[in-house]
Amino acid sequence: MSAFGYGGGWGGGGGRGFGDGSANIEEISAKVRDWYLLSRLLKLLLPYWFCVLFSLFCSLASTLLQIVNPLILSVAIDVYFMKHAPRSAFLAGILPHNSAKGIALLSLLYGIVLTLTLLIDSTQNFLAQWTGQMAMAELRRRLLRHLHRLPISFYDVTPAGRLVTRLTTDIEALNDLFANGVVALLADAITALFFLVALFWVEWHLAIVVAAVIPVFLLLIKFFRGLITRSQQKVRILIARINAFIAEHANGIYVVHLFNRQQPSLQTFDIINHEHMNASKQWVTANAWFMPSIGLLNTISQAGILITGTILLQAGLLSIGILVAFLQYGSKFLRPIQDISDRYSVLQTSIVSAEKVFALLDTEIPQEMEQHSNAKPRGADIAFHNVWFAYKPERWVLNDVSFHIRDGEMLAIVGHTGAGKTTMSNLLLRFYKPQRGTIRIGGADIWEMPPSELRRQFGVVLQDTYVREGTILDNIRFGSETVTDEDALRAAQIIGLDTLLASLPDGLETWVQERGDNLSTGQKQLIAFARALAHNPKFLLLDEATSSIDVETEARIRGAMSRLLENRTTVVIAHRLSTVLQADRILVMHKGRVAETGGHEELLARRGLYWRLFQIQFGHQLNPEEKSPVRQGAGDDLHVAPSQVPGNGYALQSAQ
Amino acid sequence: MIISCTHYYRTVPMIDSQPFVQDECAVSLRERYAFVWKYLKVHPKSLFVGIASLIALNGVAPAIPLLIRSGINTLTSGRSHILASIAWIGLALVGVAFLRSAFQTLSRLNVVGMSRHVEYAMRKDFLTHLFRLDASFWGRTRTGDVMALATNDLNAVRMMLGPGLISFFESMVQLPVAIVVLGYSNWRLTLAALLPAPIAVVLMVTFGKIIRRRFGLIQAQFSTMSAAVQQTIAGARVVRSFVCEEAEQHRFETMNRSYVRSNCILGVYSSTFDPLLTYVTGLSVLIVFWYGGALTLAHKLTVGNFVMFTTYMALLAQPISSLGRVVNMMQRGMASLARLQLLFREAPAIEPGVWLNPGTPSDEPDLQGARGLSLRQVSVFFGSHAALKSVDLEIPPGATVAVLGETGSGKSTLVKLITRVIDPSHGTVSLDGIDCRDLPLTAIRSQVGVVPQETFLFSLTLAENIALGVENTTEDEIRHAASIAGLDPDLAALPAGFETIVGERGIMLSGGQKQRVAIARAVLKNPRILILDDALSSVDSVTEERILRHLKDIMAERTTILVTHRVATAMQADTIVVLKQGQIVERGTHDALVKQNGRYARLARLQALEEELEVL
């Protein structure tokens, strides 16, 4: 059953522990998974294959320049300082006899090589960043699109903060994977190989000496790399824990104070903090031995080149210039090899984010939630036929509910907390699928209509009116293509928003802050009304807010509502006296069943459920001047308890 | 990051308080040095050995190009039996390199190791200080600001003390030595070769600034994007109702694009940064090549010297860029140091007392049984707004008092007075006849158990969250407390029962479940005074009734304050007070108040009707 797809109230996909899973089998499967994730990331780069190829080409070119650079110097030494005939063909054709001219020419060449290196390296760096940014943008795009398709029930069990983190922070962490990822590894490997081949081409004797260092170097890497990667990962995990600890204790500081938790918390913190220091000192220690060892190795190799070079020189197999060039090659040659090992450890840490992002992207969308044929409503009536629904198995929120609303009729639904009122609007909009029964609008089963077609028929005003950053007009238009700015303006005028906001300097262009913090509840409601009106729907679905508003706004809302209702089939989940009085018919829900239906007077006369509800919910509204604790208390009680309706679950959760 | 600070303290409007703004200039340089010295002086050995080896390291380093010069000079001398001397030079090279590496290791171990110690100590002091600060600070501070200090600023200070110090000596020792060594060979060439150095330094500093500024812009854009995504996700229902998925996607795309654009602009700077630096230092080699080449041709410079100059110039790229790096790191580090110091200067309005020094004996009056509470002529002003006006309330030991009132009537302020989160502006709050202001905070809070309306759960196991207020506890005790709080049915649904991680990084609990955890927490703490601050607002009335039934025994032996809006809850109290605009307007037993036929009576009537509904 689709409605249970994401687990009951306790939420799916709980937090993952740190550093668990060290068994061998898991490690192997982790490696398989890593390559799988990397290949998926690579696919994101496919549209930019040309840039990727070009950047690989750049790294080749850059390597070539690195080899040419010392050679220019060697030619200067051999030809002009030592006055030898050039041993190699390098530049032989263009060298002038005049020494001063020759040095000037070689300097110029050197300058050109230098400038080319600058251009090529910058281009390559930029391309890597650019392709990475493009791929991340695409990933964000896809993820948001996916989020728009995931069923509402998914949102009910997943903290909004977690989703935001996936789409923002986690994708951002992939930058490392793109910058240091497979492409960069490939480039390094090419560079190292090309460098070695080129060295053998220039002078194979000395190249052997240079290459002799490689095994020692690899041993050094093998010895230190594990140490460095492990301590580095430990540092990252621990610093994340430290920051989470501080953030959490800052947010819950009053609990810390009220429960005298300072000392125990500090002790716990000291353990993590100490562990972090130790781990980072391990890291520092490993680096403090590793880097100088490489330096030592470099110099040993230089000494080897010097001695071997002297022997070769005396045997007449070598010129001084080439010897000097090789003295400079030594250190550069090791660079790409070291980069490969550096990148590999970065890769291992940031692959975790990729896993999380892809896991969300792979969350399945139950087929039936999007399934539809092309049924079209004829007319504007609504019918529930024996509808049964439960959020959790066997806990029926709606019990065999049937009713019919005629074309153009206004139906008010009233009922106590947990009666199932909000659930009815959830079902009507196809947010959830009833386990039994059918719902039809204009004779068509809503599950046979495309969801977007269905929803376009409705103008919806939810209980906690939703506004977001932007101008008031933006909030009315809400980005719909079907609504022009003129429509929005007209809707605002009809609802009476323009006169209400006349006092504000920017009127309808007033900037609404996040969550509408600068607007009153009444103003937000009127915006929601205008939004519904601007979309010119066939049906209206209103879930009235329970919070109290002042008399003047109340009158405005009443006026706006009657204009909104004209010629529309309307369902109102009513919390206001004026609304029930306005309704053509009242449906009294109780514990998931339809308890009573009829007109206001008729129901009152029955002295049944409605009569009691009326006194609790609407009685005090007969005398609006009186604002007593009664109103407050009763009003509070009517809020739907979050534990009962999953829809309230998406309270602001902080992004980690 | 959308982390708001603790709402419990947020609701306290602070008197004469400024928001937590940081003006770095308020801390003089001398004070900053004194502050950092406090942390450095604890590690005299590391400091001495580290700096000594840094000086030695950079002093030894120039020997390598010198040795290479003598090697080349020997080779070009035209003598025939040079292999032995070259071998000696090779050996010397290895020896020097060995020394250099040893000093390098020694300096890293000591200097960077020390910076990690300082980081540890500073972070420890940081959290300790955060714990010391009270509502007067937390009521006006966003968690995001605190976190920026804990992460960015602490990091900047560590970078200044570790890599910063290393870079400082690298350039401060190597550059002068290079100038002397090279200048001794040929001072004209030296001057010429060092011409691009200032450009490199200026480049480092400017690029550093631009990149930092750009990065700041991107961070801001990132949080705007996060906020927009947050709004889209929070409004998922509305978005779908109005079939605006495409429009939302489009809106996001605009932001997504401009974010990418900013990143690419930053990319232009960051991807040219390193190559440009290499280029500028490469210019030095070019100058040596061209000018030094001419000098060599004119026999004013030996080939060995020529090679030494080119090798040395390549080696100098490091200390030259270090100079720029030092400037950047110092700028950031000193600014961060000031910001951290400003936080350390914040002082709580109410001093927390003994927990800071666990060794000192507490002067807690050792009383058994319930505690009596009394409020005499208590008023609380927030600025000109009076939250409570001349409230008199006597609560004998063991009594239960219910407090009813609208939002803003002063209920929460009353609770905060009793837990001494705030002090009264006038009048006294006393515990067993002792003015609360004379009692240490820990003493008061160990007596009082509060169940707030909204609970904060730490990312710990459920059991640890329940046992938050107590030191040693058994599983049975936790189980018992949980069952009193009505958590049993929830436990069965949790994947790992008591061992399930909850909170932000764990499983999401509903509002009602959180409240029950809070009740279990307070029950396990076994306080003398129990305060339920609208603690059952998110549980349904059946569960509420069950919990209250369980709590009855516990409430009987304790002084209890029930802040509520449900008559069924209030009925259990010995005395009921109704607050309105900071004053007690009705007071008495349930029966008396019903007879009085005022606000309470009306509420009682309506809620009786509701109860009837439940049974229908």
Image (tube, rainbow, N blue to C red):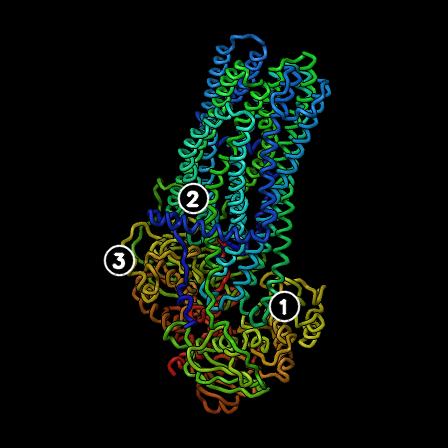
Residue B611 left/right relative to B476: right
Residue at 46% across, 62% down: A363
Q: Earlier in the sequence, mark 2 or mark 1?
A: 2
Q: Residues within 10 Å of mark 3 (few under 14, many from 20)?
A: few
Left or right of residue A240: residue A127: right
Tag 2 secondary structure: helix
Query: Of discs 3 and 2, which sits in the foreground?
Result: 2
Which kind of residue does numbered mark 1 sit on? Phe
Q: Are marks 3 and 2 on the same chain?
A: no
Which residue is disc 3 drawn over? B476
Q: Is residue B466 above or below residue A240?
A: below
Q: Residue at x 46, y 91 (%)?
A: A606
Give the CA distance from mark 3 to mark 2: 32 Å
Residue A169 visible in this rendered orientation of the protein = no
C-alpha separation, residue under disc 2 versus residue under disc 1: 43 Å
Chain letter, disc 1 residue: A
Q: Which residue is mark 1?
A: A478
Please report contact status of discs 3 and 1: CB closer than 8 Å, yes or no. no
